[in-house]
Image (spheres, rainbow, N blue to C red):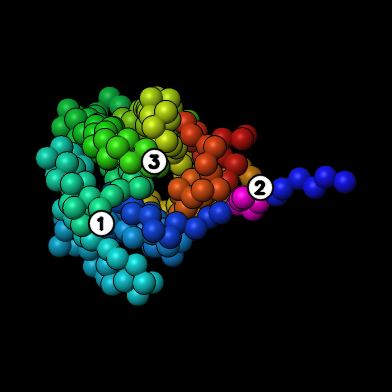
Amino acid sequence: MRTLAAPMNEYPNFDLTGQVALVTGAARGLGRAISLALANAGADVALGLRDVNRAGDLPLEIEKIGRRTLPLQMDTSSLEQIHRAIERVVEQFGRIDLLVNNAGIAPVNMAEDVNEQDFDRTLAVNLKGTFFASQYAARHMIRQNSGCIVNMSSQAGFVALPSESVYCMTKAGIAHLTKCLAIEWGRYGVRVNAVAPTFIRTPGTEAALSDPQFEADVVERIAGLHRIGRPVEVSGAVVFLASPAASLITGHTILIDGGWTAR
């Protein structure tokens, strides 16, 4: 009887050993958690920071895991800083395999009170920064004929959150941009996906969640699991999308919302 040969990769592979990643907005919260998770999975991690002097102990933590790291000045509202940071990554490590567009801001104001400065700044960081960081990184990835980009969308791109209309708009835009870039760059072996978290307990959400009434309302709206998320529950999805295990996934946004949008 003829025996069929087993496929070369019979089991999913989540290993990122030898990969070079750049995480924007890496200083704290989700950016920090994602940076450490990628390092734990085997990647060397460059840290895009709005203020390079505020990296804290993150570079040391990555080095303790046994990975190389590179703190970079990278305000994603500045195209010059984006371009310079990505060039530094390639100069230092010889390549760039993964870009995580995590940097984002969310000024809170009712739509009738939004001012032009907050509007322009939110679009500059969240949408324009994501687009051009992706563009600059993809130019190197296209030459390599391989690469992966993971964008940070939000459940706010799929549901309306009062007082956050501009933020919601940018996160919806990121989800659709993800599809557009995936279709354009797939022929070069570059995958583009996004994650869309619900409220995650980080320094950025600490003030809002310190209000017991607000937290209770959020927990109720997270209709499936009824609890606030943890950073590791987002970083795990990023590692998955970056890994060979997700090699057939592109143009997709994974909602990490505990069931909020399922209701």
For marks 3 and 2, give the one nearer the viewer: 2
Span shown in magenta: 8-12
Q: Which residue is mark 3?
A: 146
Identify which residue is drawn at 23% across, 37% down: 136
Residue 174 visible, this angle: yes
Residue ranking furthest to the front:
1
Point out residue 4 in the picture as x, y percentages from the top left corner: 76, 45
Identify which residue is drawn at 70% across, 49% down: 6
Q: Which mark is residue 7?
A: 2
* For residue 9, side relative to residue 216 (left or right): right
Name the foreground residue: 124 vs 21: 21
Q: In terms of secondary structure, where does tag 2 sit?
A: loop
Residue 118 vertical position relative to residue 17 in the rendered view, above or below: above
* Residue type of the residue flagged with mark 1: Phe
Task: Tell me which numbered mark, 3 or 1, is placed earlier along the sequence.
Answer: 1
Point out residue 257 in the picture as x, y percentages from the top left corner: 53, 43
3D distance between C-alphas at marks 1 and 2: 32 Å
**Residue 10 belongs to magenta span:** yes
Identify which residue is drawn at 80% across, 47% down: 3
* Residue type of the residue flagged with mark 3: Ser
* For residue 205, side relative to residue 228 (left or right): left
Q: Which mark is residue 93?
A: 1
* For residue 148, side relative to residue 124 (left or right): right
